[in-house]
Image (cartoon, rainbow, N blue to C red):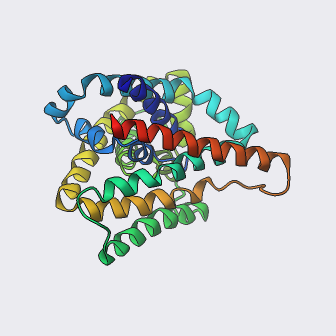
């Protein structure tokens, strides 16, 4: 059962990397397996051996979500934007109770927790508004040569660190760098001139990001999870859809919101009890 959950989580994790504004790290926290996956990303052999099948199915699901659903997700976002975004918002909001539970496993909330929560919330929301007003706009890359290879690897490295950080969207980072369409197009047609340097940068970024996260968690789990809670709540802002009102799309979207929340709560509870 846990391996099957790993596969489902992997699909969601993979899909999250396709949608600007969605954070794969957020869903790992919501599903209660964030630290386990981070330890695996950080190449902790003991953790990998202990959770081998779960991690294997998570990896398979991630590939399926990233490659197999890229066309479907773009279709739904283009044609059912309100419903799709509200569904993802439901997934995120439904995971908040589990994050609170994980944060307070060792100690209760205290006044000092407010600061990291506000900082985490402000970080994600400010990144969203800065990107929205074009502060990060760049020209992307042109031409396939050594410089192209290095720049793609570097962009992927930065985006991969964001993939590990809850609340921060790796796809958003690619949009900010002006290479999101290039990366998505490469996934769709298997353009290895882009995928190879992207893969190299992603692997290095994921390992580095995971080691960094685990280091700060060891220092103070409660403080880190308070910041994570702020980032997770802040990650809802980029998903707030345009066109909400007294219409059928909004009504259907509210149903999708409720369904997303219910799915997140159920799956998080199952993972937490596994």
Residue 70 locus on image (x, y percent): 57, 30
Q: Which of 202 and 266 is in front in this view?
A: 266
| Residue extending furthest toward the right | 247
**Is residue 118 in view from this perspective?**
yes
Q: How many marks?
A: 0
Residue 229 % position (x, y): 41, 60
x and y, in percent, of residue 208 in the image: 24, 46
Residue drawn at (57%, 65%) of the image: 129
Measuring 51% from the left and 65% from the top, which residue is drawn there? Answer: 125
| Residue 256 vs residue 21, the one in the foreground | 256
Query: Looking at the picture, does residue 60 appear above or below residue 183?
Result: above
Answer above or below: position of 149 versus 67: below
Location of the N terminus (image quadrant): top left
Relative placement, left or right, of 220 versus 94 is left
At 15% from the left edge and 31% from the top edge, which residue is drawn? 45
Q: Name which quarter of the figure residue 32 lies in.
A: top left
Q: In this view, does 251 lie to the left or right of 209?
A: right
Name the foreground residue: 267 vs 134.
Answer: 267
Q: In which quarter of the image is the C terminus?
A: top left
In the picture, measured across the screen, residue 158 lies left or right of residue 239, that is left
**Residue lying farthest to the bottom in this orientation:** 111
Q: For residue 19, say whether it is visible.
A: no
- Which residue is outermost to the left? 46
Position of 141 with respect to 158 (left or right) is right
């Amino acid at each position: 059962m846990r391996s099957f959950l790993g596969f489902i989580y992997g699909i969601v994790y993979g899909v999250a990397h396709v949608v600007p504004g969605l954070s794969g790290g957020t869903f790992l926290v919501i599903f209660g397996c964030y630290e386990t996956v981070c330890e695996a990303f950080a190449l902790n052999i003991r953790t990998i051996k202990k959770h081998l099948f779960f991690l294997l199915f998570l990896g398979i699901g991630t590939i399926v979500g990233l490659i197999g659903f890229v066309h479907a997700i773009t279709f739904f976002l283009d044609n059912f934007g309100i419903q799709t975004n509200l569904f993802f918002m439901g997934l995120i909001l439904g995971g908040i109770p589990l994050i609170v539970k994980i944060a307070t496993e060792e100690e209760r909330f205290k006044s000092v927790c407010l600061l990291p929560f506000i900082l985490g919330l402000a970080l994600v929301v400010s990144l969203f508004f800065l990107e929205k007003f074009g502060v990060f706009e760049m020209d992307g890359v042109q031409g396939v040569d050594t410089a192209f290879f290095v720049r793609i690897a570097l962009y992927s490295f930065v985006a991969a660190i964001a993939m590990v950080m809850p609340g921060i969207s790796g796809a958003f980072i690619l949009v900010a760098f002006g290479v999101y369409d290039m990366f998505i197009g490469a996934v769709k047609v298997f353009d290895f001139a882009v995928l190879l340097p992207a893969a190299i940068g992603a692997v290095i970024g994921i390992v580095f990001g995971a080691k960094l996260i685990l280091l700060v968690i060891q220092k103070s789990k409660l403080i880190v999870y308070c910041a994570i809670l702020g980032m997770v709540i802040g990650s809802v802002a980029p998903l707030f859809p345009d066109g909400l009102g007294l219409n059928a799309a909004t009504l259907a979207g509210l149903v999708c919101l409720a369904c997303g929340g219910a799915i997140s709560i159920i799956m998080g509870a199952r993972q937490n009890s596994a």
